Structures are given as structure tokens and as C-alpha cells.
Image (spheres, rainbow, N blue to C red):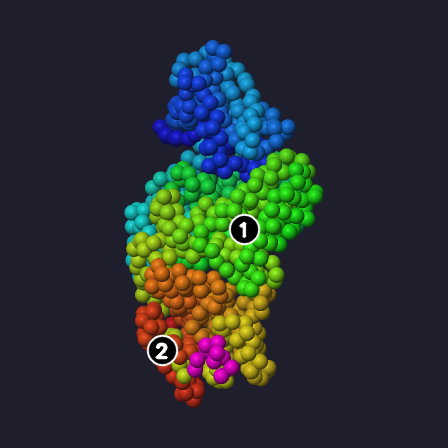
């Protein structure tokens, strides 16, 4: 007998869903508001009434024993008849609300009613479906009376329909578990330290712990983490989340799952992509009046999920678009809904950690047990701050003011109050400076914004045609997210006022999100592994991600050290004040490297300004060398075109001048002859800015390491990432040159990864040229030897 537990609410929402995306998801009341509405209404109950009544029953059908349960909002006695009340808070205008507007609500009440009647041997019952407006507590009620026989028929029919879906889920889950148990590692041999890494990750999942794994390129982190985590799965509630900040990282994860499938894995894998990239319209507009994929979404989604689940195993963006068109459903919301029934979910960090967009079903409720794998975890420090920060712009509100005359009810008064507030702050703080900070929340602003949100809710819930709705929604979300983040404001935040191009921006800037990240992991996951090739120094990451909690391991690189010629040129300063004097040396060293052998080379700079200064001085024979440079705001097509150039063989050397820490500084694989060497100019310190100085001051007080936490460590990470571009496989050979006098200071030496123990200091250009020639010659000899003996 296969036992299965589910709530009546889950069954109702799956089988009786209806309506448009916006009417359910944009207008849904926030959890706290819903609780307050329930408590408000239940406080009016008579002494003889009961609230939050738990009900449960079991239903046996063939091989299944289904346990259905839930909590009834109220059991009342009215006119001598037992009355079951189901309370729903809403922002929807009652003019547009009927008893069948949301069939799932009445279905949920009917399931509850049957179970209650069964438990209490009742012959008839009245159902009272009560809707309460969030803003004014206005009440609308629908009454229906049922016999036991009527509700029994409904219950049995509903459960049979659910079991037909459950049979498919259960069959897959059994196949998945058998496939995992029988799954073998898909390669004949483990790479150096790969098996040890897998053992640590496996144990971390079993222990529900936090693990930081520094694993150099080439060890096989992706396959090691996914394979070992799958092996630890022993419950259908567990789901594997593979989180990456880069699209390339997500694609590698999907390719890894495909590889495991080819070796026997049976699993459903869901790739959640950004909403804009998933949209089936030429230009995204989520208004159901405009988008046919949003209109009536919930009526069609069950069949869409069933179809996709039965016919595909890896749900990619392309697959979602294909099936989304077929079933006329929004492909983005489709991906969120089918993730409920997926075993592996590949997504960006924000779907796990960002409180504004994280998947509530996994990270606020306790239905599932996510296993978290966080790839390229060195990005998480800055990303975590961004996820818990928010900005409200004067320009946004001015846009809304212009739209106000088109809307009913008009939000003009509330918007104008917000703009008056901005003008006040301009006079108080920003007449002579462009950036000021304030400790503590600005409660005055939040009060005004909450009133504006209430007005927005009235506009959006009217279900009338809303002019310029896409622009209205953009403003709504900016205001909503600002108010949402205020719930997290604590001593790790700072409130800022900034003037940019004459317009004011008000921000809540999170300086340290470690408490929130740790709590997400400890309260809503089955353990988390952070992994990257560069987690140095490890204490910096542990402190700023999980408040020093967790274990850490550091694996040795599988690549031969002598394949990377690592040189520091320390007789020059690249500090801002010395840059003009450094240009000659940077050009001299770069040309010595580039002219030593035909190949592809990258020069990394701390800023576009510095990059352009060197570019103007570089002088190569155009018949021998092609030079290109990164421009500000390069499009995705332009970036891909640049990468394609490096991956395409040429009869000339190719040199790229890029900014350190950007898209070309990490997460790109240029294997073999695609990249012969890199020059790293400067220690990668982030730009001096008011925000970075805030970080410095904050961490000086908190850890007495302000400059290192704000500048040194983030900069060093960019340097290590840039050097890591050179050696991407066991046969790669290449040269990395670090130019700056700080690279040979005691402080920096103490922070380098162990793989850099062979760093040489050479300042003489003639010596460098001889060394380069010798290095390449040795590589040719080794290559010829290997060919002769292969």
C-alpha cells in the first residue's frame, strides 16, 4: 500500500484552478495580511463557535492510501444547522466576484465539509464562503447547503481524479529512486580529489549542514556535486536546487544531468529562467487583456503540466516555450508550477535567497526539503546584499504622476505626497552634497508608500481596463519591493539619499545579509554546499554568507603547476595617482608576452579609463595582431561575438582588452590554444564609491577589517578568477602576469591560493622575453614527446 499525504487546499488548487495570472498572483494578499484578516473575523465568533478545526480522513483506492487533511477556519451553528466557514481575504472589487470566480475556494470548502461530516456523522451542512476586503474589511458571503451524499460524491470523484495524477507521480518517483540507487559514476576514473569532494558533499546533505568547498578548475565540481547530492536523496519531499549566477553555469548543470540520464538516471529537471527571456510575446506585457497566455492561465495549466510531465525529462526554456504555445499558458509561470513536480531545479540565486522573488512553496512553507548547491559562490557576497536592498527613484514617481490622471481611483494625491517628501529631503540634505546616510528606517516615507500601495491595490483589483498597465505595474513593483525590504531592515542596513543627474534616489542598502542567508539554509533546506575555485580567504565568505557557520574544505588542483608560468612585475604602481607613469611599463610587458608566440591574449584592467589609456599606446603590426577592447554596455550579441573570435582559429594573434571582474573575467572556458596568456593590471580593488566606503566603515566597526572586507578581498577574487582563465584543462599551458607592486607585499602573499606557490618576480623585459621563449619551447618539446609516445 502506497501512503500519500496531501492537504485539501493543494488538491483544490491543482484540480480546480481558474482565472488569470494577475488576478491570483499580483492581487494575492500578503501572508501576514491574510492572517490578520482571519483573526479579525474569527474574533467576532460566538463562544459556542469553533475556529481552526483540524480534520483528516483516509481514502483507500487500489494500491493507494490517501490521507487528506486541513484546518477549517470556522465551525458555527446558525439557524440550528452546522455551518462550515471558509475565509478568504481579497483585494478584488466585489462587483466582479461571484461564488464561482475562484472554483478552488469552494472546492476546498467542500472537501473540508465532507471530512467534517464523516468525522461527526452529519447528514447535511451549510458552507459559508466569506470574502473580506483587505482595505476596508467589507464582507461578501456566499451560502450553499449540501447533503452528505452530495459531498461524498464530490469527494470521491475529486480524489479519483487526483489519484490518476498521483499514479504518474508515484510511478516516476519509484523509477527515479531505483535509478539513483543503481546509478554509477559516468566516467571510468575520478579526477584528483574528486571522490573526496563528493564524499564531503554527500555527508553534508545527510547532516543537513553548510559546507564551503574550494575546488580548483578541472576537478569536476558540477558532476561531483550533482551526483553525490542525488545519491543522498531518500525522500520524495527532497528536491535538488542547483543555483548559479551565470547562464553558462546553468547550461553546464543541464548538460551534466543529460550525461547522467545517458547513464541511467531517471529524473525530472526544471530550468527556471528570467521572465523576459521566457516571454512568448514580442514585448512582455502581463496584462491578461493583452496576453492570451496570462488570460485563463489557471484553467489550462493542469493539462499543460500533465502533458509536459509525461513527455519530457529536462524542461528547458525552449521546451517551456514550445509547450506554452501548445497549451496557451505563460511559459515563465509554467516553469514555476511544474517545479513542484520536478526532482532537480536549475535556477539563479534569487529564486532561493531573494525575499522578493524566492519560491514561496519551498522557502516559506515546509512542504519540501530543498538540497542547495550554490555554484560560483564567490558571487554570493555581493549578490546577497543586492537581494536584500531596495531603491525608490524620484523619476519613477514622476512617471506615475503623469499616469495618475488616466487611473480610477486616481493615486495622484498619494504620489504627490511622495514627491513632496523627495523635495523635502532635497532641501534638507542634498543642496550641497550628492550622497547622505541615515541610521534607522525613514518611517515617514514608509507610511506614505503604504498608502500609495493601498491605492494601487484598489486600482488593480477593479478588473477594469487599466490604461498603460505595463508602466503602472513597473511603478507598483518598485514601490512594493521597497516596502517589502523594509521588513528586513536591521543594524546591518543603512538608509541613503542620493542625487543622480538631478534626480533623488532613496535606498535601503544591506551591508551584510549573512543572517538572512543562514536562516534560509537552516530553516528551509536540507543543507547547502557553496563551491567555487576561488573562496580565498575562506573566513571572509563564511562571515558574510552564514555568520561563520559551516565547515570548509580546500581541494588541491589536478593541473600541473609547471603548465602555468606565473609572474609578478612589482616595480610599478598602478594606483590611480600613478597610472600615467605606469602606462609605458604595462605596454612593454604586454607586448613582450604577445610577441613571444602567436596566440590569443587578454589584458585585464581595473577600469575602462585605464583600459583606453593603454589601448591608445599599444602599437602592433595589423598583419600580425588583431586588437579589440571591451566597451561599456556591450550587448549580449556583441559579447558573444567577442568570445567567438577567441574560439575561432586565426593566422594572427588576437588580443582583448577587458575590464577585470566583468563577463570576460570569469565563467568562460577558452581551452587549449584559445587563450595563451593574460596580463592583470592592478590588484582589482573595487572603485572608490560612497557605498564601498559605507562597507568599509561598517566592517571596521563590526570586524576591524573594513578595508579588506570592502576592497582587498573582493579585488583579489577578481584577480584569481582572471588568472583562472588560462588553464582550463590538463593539457593547457599558458602565462599569467600580475603587474603592481602590491602583488609581492606580505599581505597579498598570505592570501594567495596554494597553487600560486611558484610565483616568480621578474621586472626586466629582456629576462621576461627569454623566459617566455623557454616556456613555450618546453611546451613544444613535451607536446612532440607525447605525440611520439601516444
Query: Which of the two residues, 408 or 245, is positioned nearer the viewer here?
Result: 408
Query: Which of the two residues, 703 or 525, is positioned nearer the viewer here?
Result: 703
Q: Which residues are magenta?
A: 572-581
Q: Main secondary structure of the magenta part?
A: helix
Q: Does 573 lie within the magenta span? A: yes
Position above or below: 69 against 755: above
Mark whose residue sits in front, 1 or 2:
2
Q: Position of residue 202 (x, y in %)?
A: 31, 50
Q: Which quadrant of the structure image shows residue 751?
A: bottom left
Position above or below: 159 against 380: above
Q: Residue at x 47, y 84 (%)?
A: 585
The numbered disc on residue 155 is none
Q: Which quadrant of the structure image shows residue 122?
A: top left
Query: Which of the two residues, 609 or 767, is positioned nearer the viewer here?
Result: 609
Query: Dot 2: what SS?
Result: helix
Q: What crowding class fits label 1: few (fewer than 14 Cα within 10 Å), some (14-19), or many (20 or more)?
A: few
Q: Does 256 lie within the magenta span? A: no
Residue at the spot of label 2: 744
Q: What crowding class fits label 2: few (fewer than 14 Cα within 10 Å), some (14-19), or many (20 or more)?
A: some
- Figure label count: 2
Query: Dot 1: what SS?
Result: loop
**Quarter of the image where the N terminus is located:** top left
Residue at the spot of label 1: 274
Amino acid at each position: 500500500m502506497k501512503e500519500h499525504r496531501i492537504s485539501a487546499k493543494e488538491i483544490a488548487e491543482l484540480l480546480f484552478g481558474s482565472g488569470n495570472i494577475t488576478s491570483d498572483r499580483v492581487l494575492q494578499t500578503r501572508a501576514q495580511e491574510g492572517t490578520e484578516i482571519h483573526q479579525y473575523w474569527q474574533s467576532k465568533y460566538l463562544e459556542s463557535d469553533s475556529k481552526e478545526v483540524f480534520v483528516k480522513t483516509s481514502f483507500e483506492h487500489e494500491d493507494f492510501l490517501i490521507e487528506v487533511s486541513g484546518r477549517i477556519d470556522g465551525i458555527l451553528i446558525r439557524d440550528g444547522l452546522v455551518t462550515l466557514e471558509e475565509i478568504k481575504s481579497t483585494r478584488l472589487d466585489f462587483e466582479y466576484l461571484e461564488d464561482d470566480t475562484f472554483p478552488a475556494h469552494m472546492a476546498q470548502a467542500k472537501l473540508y465539509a465532507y471530512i467534517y461530516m464523516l468525522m461527526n456523522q452529519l447528514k447535511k451542512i451549510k458552507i459559508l464562503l466569506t470574502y473580506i476586503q483587505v482595505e476596508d474589511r467589507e464582507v461578501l458571503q456566499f451560502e450553499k447547503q449540501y447533503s452528505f451524499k452530495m459531498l461524498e460524491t464530490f469527494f470521491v470523484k475529486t480524489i479519483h481524479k487526483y489519484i490518476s495524477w498521483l499514479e504518474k507521480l508515484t510511478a516516476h518517483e519509484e523509477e527515479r529512486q531505483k535509478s539513483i540507487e543503481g546509478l554509477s559514476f559516468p566516467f571510468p576514473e575520478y579526477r584528483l580529489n574528486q571522490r573526496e569532494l563528493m564524499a564531503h558533499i554527500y555527508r553534508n546533505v545527510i547532516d543537513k549542514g553548510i559546507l564551503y568547498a574550494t575546488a580548483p578548475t578541472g576537478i569536476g565540481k558540477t558532476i561531483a556535486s550533482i551526483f553525490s547530492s542525488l545519491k543522498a536523496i531518500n525522500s520524495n519531499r527532497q528536491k535538488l536546487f542547483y543555483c548559479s549566477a551565470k547562464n553558462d553555469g546553468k547550461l553546464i548543470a543541464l548538460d551534466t544531468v543529460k550525461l547522467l540520464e545517458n547513464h541511467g538516471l531517471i529524473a525530472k529537471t526544471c530550468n527556471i529562467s528570467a521572465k523576459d527571456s521566457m516571454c512568448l510575446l514580442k514585448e512582455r506585457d502581463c496584462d491578461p487583456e493583452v496576453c492570451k497566455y496570462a488570460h485563463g492561465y489557471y484553467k489550462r495549466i493542469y493539462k499543460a503540466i500533465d502533458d509536459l510531465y509525461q513527455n519530457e525529462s529536462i524542461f528547458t526554456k525552449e521546451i517551456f516555450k514550445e509547450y506554452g504555445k501548445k497549451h496557451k499558458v505563460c511559459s515563465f509561470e509554467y516553469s514555476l508550477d511544474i517545479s513542484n513536480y520536478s526532482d532537480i531545479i536549475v535556477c539563479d540565486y534569487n529564486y532561493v535567497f531573494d525575499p522578493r522573488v524566492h519560491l514561496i512553496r519551498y522557502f516559506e512553507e515546509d512542504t519540501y526539503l530543498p538540497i542547495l548547491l550554490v555554484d560560483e559562490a564567490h558571487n554570493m557576497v555581493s549578490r546577497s546584499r543586492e537581494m536584500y536592498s531596495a531603491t525608490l527613484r524620484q523619476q519613477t514617481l514622476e512617471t506615475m504622476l503623469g499616469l495618475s490622471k488616466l487611473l480610477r481611483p486616481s493615486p495622484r494625491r498619494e504620489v504627490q505626497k511622495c514627491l513632496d517628501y523627495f523635495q523635502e529631503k532635497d532641501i534638507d540634505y542634498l543642496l550641497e552634497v550628492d550622497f547622505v546616510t541615515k541610521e534607522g528606517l525613514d518611517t515617514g516615507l514608509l507610511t506614505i508608500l503604504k498608502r500609495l500601495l493601498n491605492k494601487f491595490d484598489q486600482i488593480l483589483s477593479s478588473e477594469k481596463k487599466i490604461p498603460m498597465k505595463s508602466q503602472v505595474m513597473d511603478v507598483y513593483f518598485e514601490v512594493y519591493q521597497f516596502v517589502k525590504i523594509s521588513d528586513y531592515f536591521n543594524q546591518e542596513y543603512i538608509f541613503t539619499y542620493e542625487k543622480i543627474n538631478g534626480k533623488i534616489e532613496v535606498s535601503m542598502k544591506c551591508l551584510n545579509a549573512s543572517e538572512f542567508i543562514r536562516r534560509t539554509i537552516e530553516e528551509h533546506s536540507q543543507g547547502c554546499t557553496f563551491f567555487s575555485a576561488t573562496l580565498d580567504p575562506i573566513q571572509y565568505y563564511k562571515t558574510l554568507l552564514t555568520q561563520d557557520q559551516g565547515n570548509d574544505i580546500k581541494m588541491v588542483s589536478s593541473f600541473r603547476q609547471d603548465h602555468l608560468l606565473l609572474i609578478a612585475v612589482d616595480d610599478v604602481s598602478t594606483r590611480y595617482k600613478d597610472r600615467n607613469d605606469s602606462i609605458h611599463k604595462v605596454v612593454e610587458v604586454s607586448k613582450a608576452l604577445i610577441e613571444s608566440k602567436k596566440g590569443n591574449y587578454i589584458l585585464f584592467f581595473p577600469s575602462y579609463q585605464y583600459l583606453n589609456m593603454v589601448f591608445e599606446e599599444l602599437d602592433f603590426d595589423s598583419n600580425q595582431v588583431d586588437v579589440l577592447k571591451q566597451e561599456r554596455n556591450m550587448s549580449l550579441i556583441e559579447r558573444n561575438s567577442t568570445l567567438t573570435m577567441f574560439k575561432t582559429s586565426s593566422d594572427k594573434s588576437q588580443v582583448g582588452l577587458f575590464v577585470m571582474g566583468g563577463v570576460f573575467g570569469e565563467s568562460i572556458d577558452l581551452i587549449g590554444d584559445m587563450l595563451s596568456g593574460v596580463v592583470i593590471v592592478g590588484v582589482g580593488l573595487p572603485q572608490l564609491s560612497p557605498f564601498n566606503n559605507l562597507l568599509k566603515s561598517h566592517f571596521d566597526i563590526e570586524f576591524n577589517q573594513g578595508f579588506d572586507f570592502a576592497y582587498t578581498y573582493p579585488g583579489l577574487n577578481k584577480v584569481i578568477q582572471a588568472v583562472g582563465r588560462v588553464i582550463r584543462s590538463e593539457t593547457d599551458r599558458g602565462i599569467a602576469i600580475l603587474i603592481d607592486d602590491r602583488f609581492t607585499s606580505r599581505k597579498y602573499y598570505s592570501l594567495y591560493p596554494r597553487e600560486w606557490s611558484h610565483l616568480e618576480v621578474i621586472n626586466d623585459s629582456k629576462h621576461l622575453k627569454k623566459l617566455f621563449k623557454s616556456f613555450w619551447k618546453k611546451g613544444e618539446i613535451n607536446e612532440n614527446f607525447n605525440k611520439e609516445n601516444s
